[in-house]
Amino acid sequence: QVQLVESGGGLVQPGGSLRLSCATSGFAFSLYATGWYRQAPGNERELVATITSDGRTNSADSVRGRFTISRDNNKNTVYLQMNSLKPEDTAVYYCNARRTIFNRDYWGQGTQVTVSS
């Protein structure tokens, strides 16, 4: 059974930091591209950052220089280190694992991040 379980969300003040984790199981994690997406109320889900199976990263302009994505293939886990958080980063953050060639696309349930004073 495929599982992606996010953790690490919460309430943080502007300028603060959070580290999200996404623990996965049930598929060959090391062969999958993984990423973080977010969705704020009234908005569409948007890409935050991705990391390929061989470690190449990409991130949205809005978070570049503040957020860092990483992965640990030994732990089947992907992380998102979020620094210098802003109120506009408030959203539900979703973990994704994708292997396009086999049409595999898995999502977690999401974790809420709220940036507010």
Image (cartoon, rainbow, N blue to C red):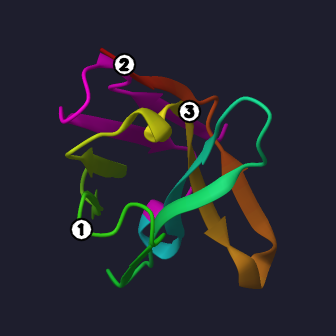
Q: Is residue 89 magenta?
A: no
Residue annotated with mark 3: 91
**Nearest the eye: 62 or 94:** 62
Which is nearer the N-term, disc 1 or disc 3?
A: 1
The secondary structure type at the circle numbered 1 is: loop
The residue shown at (64%, 67%) is 98
The residue shown at (18%, 32%) is 16
The CA distance from mark 3 to mark 2 is 12 Å
Give the residues in magenta: 1-29
- Decide: marks 3, 2 in contact (CB < 8 A)? no
Residue annotated with mark 1: 65
The CA distance from mark 1 to mark 3 is 19 Å
The CA distance from mark 1 to mark 2 is 21 Å
Which is nearer the N-term, disc 3 or disc 2?
A: 3
The crowd level at tag 3 (other Cα within 10 Å; few <14, some 14-19, many 20+) is many
The secondary structure type at the circle numbered 3 is: strand
Query: Which quadrant is home to the N terminus?
Result: top right
Q: Point out the frontmost of discs 1 and 2.
A: 2
The crowd level at tag 1 (other Cα within 10 Å; few <14, some 14-19, many 20+) is few
